[in-house]
Amino acid sequence: MSDTDRVLRSNLKLRHLQLLVALDEFRHIGRAAEFLSVTQPAVSKTLAEIERMFDLALFSRSTRGTEPTPYGASVVRFARSVLADYDRTRDEIAAVASGAAGRTHVGAMVVAMPGLLSDAIARLKAQSAQTSVLVEEGDLTRLLPRLRVGELDLIVGRLEPGYAAPDLETEALYEEGMAIVVRPEHPLRRLEKPPGWAELAGQAWVVPPPWASSRIKLNQMFYQHGLNPPVDLIETASFLATLCAVRERGCVGFVASQVARHFEREGLLATLDVEVPIALPPVGIITMRGRMRTPASEQLIACLRDAVDGLGARP
């Protein structure tokens, strides 16, 4: 095996890193070549050059395309991290040169939108209108890998204990319960009294993914009432998908209380008068421990803390 430390420190160039990430993204030499605006032989030649540096096979080739080997997966993670730092530094330098206030990339779970994060961004923009905020919605299975390689600066969402790790730093902001919602004209709203859990069990539902603590607690509520959880399900971490399922298919939804109140005011959802006495992890901020934050990220975090007061949430 070659001197890996020397290769990582001195031999790998920016074009090498970009090619590795492109191959991992597209898993196909032809599509990676098209994305990089080079020829397929040039991609193959450069990949062979990188593999000679490491004296390792980084990608396996087959008729189905290219797949990273275990060695390749490690090098791709390194490439993503370096490229993310490069982009961040370039943006910061450009922001200083232009008089703007920089850029921050934030991952948002559904529970953080539209209340906490939208309020915090409004506060940030009031202070610095030229600061750019890139928001990516998703769950922790999608957002955490992007945080770890530096493609996100922070995540706002539930601090799920199952995803706690020594490399992550968390800050709890407030507690947030859940609400059961339907579209305003749903038949359940025409009942003389609020529906019971037996009636809810027979409905079509749109629910958080199986790993989410809110989903686990919802299932436990049905079990506590001697019922099996609903079987007609749509599982999603996207609020847009949730809203469409509730509005267009007539599903019963299970969303954060702040989210329910916001869209109830807009006339898009109605909250059922059903108590959901479950304890859930707090909503807060997740960052990488020891990673230097950009000024824009620090500013957004300060605005998130300030926005909690405006929510009237329980800290």
Image: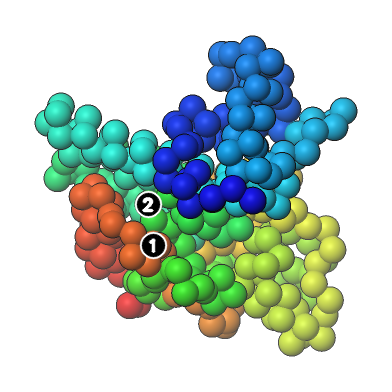
Residue 255: where, in percent of width, then height?
56, 61
- The quadrant of the rendering that contains the C terminus is bottom left
To which residue does mark 1 refer? 287
Q: Which type of secondary structure does the marked residue at label 1 adopt?
A: strand
* Protein image colouring: rainbow
Between 4 and 232, the one lying in front of the other is 4
- Which amino acid type is marked by label 2? Asp
In the picture, residue 50 is in which quadrant?
top right
The residue drawn where x is 82% and y is 80% is: 227
**In the shown orientation, is residue 135 left or right of residue 1?**
left
**In the shown orientation, is residue 141 left or right of residue 200?**
left
Disc ID at residue 153: 2
Residue 174: where, in percent of width, then height?
37, 73
- Residue lying at the far front in this picture: please name it: 2
Badge 2 crowding class, 10 Å Cα cut-off, few under 14, some 14 to 19, many 20 or more, is many
Q: Is residue 171 above or below residue 266?
A: below
In the picture, residue 290 is in which quadrant?
bottom left
Determine contact: label 2, label 1, CB under 8 Å: yes
Q: Is residue 70 visible?
A: yes
Residue 155: where, in percent of width, then height?
43, 57
The residue drawn where x is 56% and y is 13% is: 37
Between 49 and 68, the one lying in front of the other is 49
Between 109 and 31, the one lying in front of the other is 31
Q: Is residue 209 above or below residue 56?
A: below
Q: CA distance from mark 2 to mark 1?
A: 7 Å
Q: Which type of secondary structure does the marked residue at label 2 adopt?
A: loop
Tell which circle, 2 or 1, labels the residue nearer the N-terminal end. Answer: 2
Count of numbered badges drawn on the protein: 2
- Which amino acid type is marked by label 1? Thr
The residue drawn where x is 67% and y is 67% is: 211
